[in-house]
Image: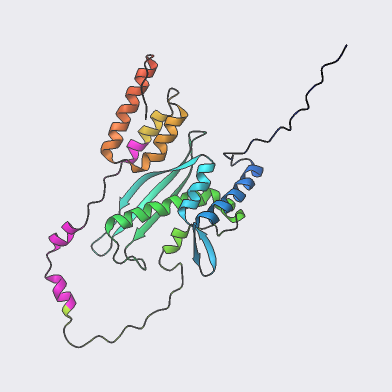
């Protein structure tokens, strides 16, 4: 009586790691290798005095592989008559645990070197970008270092005084009355202000907190939660209000056995 011959077992391939856990050192070292390749291939660094500093996109990539996304909590206008200045705070939200795992503060001013002619919305945007990089730096600096780069976001190097500059010797002022200031005084202040584009009214911190609270409801799927969190920083006040209403309706419908889209 012949015996059935068992087919040889195929080697079991180790599943590719698609996301990483910050608490597992072996996984984060794999992330450092993956991160170094991604940054190099996409040229996401800025060279400052021979050292490579990673742009905020590189920090965001590292965070996304860990399931950590940035949420702008607030942007505050701290300008005065002589200076356009904004302060931003960003928190880091862990999609796995549903908890805040980090935060970062940053400012941007048109008094900084190279930003004298920046418009107001650009100053506000840079404050947010810097805060995102700062928040990630507070928890991921060692991973960026392990990938072979400087553990400071490139955008932080924009601050006046972070890079040495050669002081220019001012030319002697002419004795004649300066013409430029006179011409500037002839321009009405109202017209100068009206020419500047209005900064968008972003969603408030309380609106974002309400959205995150609703997204943590058990009936909201992980895919819906991820999609909403990745776009939360782009919401203005009106769209945030609409998102909250839509989330509440979807949760109510699902609790009553109906089907509705949450995001």
Residue at 33% across / 49% down in the picture?
Answer: 75
Relative to 234, is 192 on the left or the right?
left
How is the model colour-coded? rainbow
Q: Is residue 195 magenta?
A: yes
Q: Position of residue 131 (x, y in %)?
A: 42, 52
Q: Position of residue 207 (x, y in %)?
A: 32, 36
Closer to us: 3 or 190: 3
Q: Quadrant of the N terminus?
A: top right
Q: Is residue 103 magenta?
A: no
Relative to 214, is 46 on the left or the right?
right
Residue at 20% across / 88% down in the picture?
Answer: 175
Relative to 3, is 204 on the left or the right?
left
Q: Quadrant of residue 258?
A: top left
Q: Residue furthest right?
A: 1
Residue at 30% across / 44% down in the picture?
Answer: 202
* Above-or-below relation of 119 to 13: below
Q: How many marks?
A: 0
* Above-or-below relation of 79 to 75: below
Q: Residue furthest top?
A: 1
Q: Quadrant of residue 263?
A: top left
Q: Position of residue 2 (x, y in %)?
A: 86, 14
Which stretch appears magenta?
180-208
Q: Position of residue 73 (x, y in %)?
A: 37, 43
């Amino acid at each position: 009586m012949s015996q059935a011959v068992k087919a040889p077992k195929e080697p079991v391939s180790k599943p590719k790691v698609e996301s990483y856990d910050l608490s597992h050192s072996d996984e984060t070292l794999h992330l450092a290798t993956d991160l170094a390749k991604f940054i190099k291939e996409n040229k996401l660094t800025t060279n400052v005095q021979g050292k490579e500093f990673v742009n905020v996109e590189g920090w965001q990539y590292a965070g996304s592989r860990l399931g950590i996304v940035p949420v702008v909590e607030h942007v505050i206008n701290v300008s005065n008559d002589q200076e356009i200045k904004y302060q931003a705070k960003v928190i880091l939200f862990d999609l796995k645990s549903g908890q805040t795992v980090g935060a970062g503060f940053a400012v941007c001013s048109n008094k900084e070197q190279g930003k004298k002619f920046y418009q107001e919305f650009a100053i506000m945007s840079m404050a947010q970008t810097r805060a995102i990089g700062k928040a990630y730096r507070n928890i991921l600096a060692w991973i960026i270092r392990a990938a072979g780069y400087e553990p400071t976001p490139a955008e932080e190097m924009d601050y006046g005084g972070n890079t040495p500059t050669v002081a220019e010797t001012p030319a002697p002022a002419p004795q004649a009355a300066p013409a430029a200031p006179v011409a500037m005084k002839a321009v009405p202040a109202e017209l100068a202000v009206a020419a500047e584009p209005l900064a968008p009214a972003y969603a408030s911190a309380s609106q974002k907190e309400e959205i995150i609270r609703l997204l943590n409801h058990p009936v909201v799927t992980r895919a819906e939660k991820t999609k909403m969190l990745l776009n939360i920083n782009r919401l203005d006040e009106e769209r945030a209000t609409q998102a909250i209403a839509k989330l509440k309706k979807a949760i109510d419908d699902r609790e009553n056995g109906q089907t509705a889209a949450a995001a």
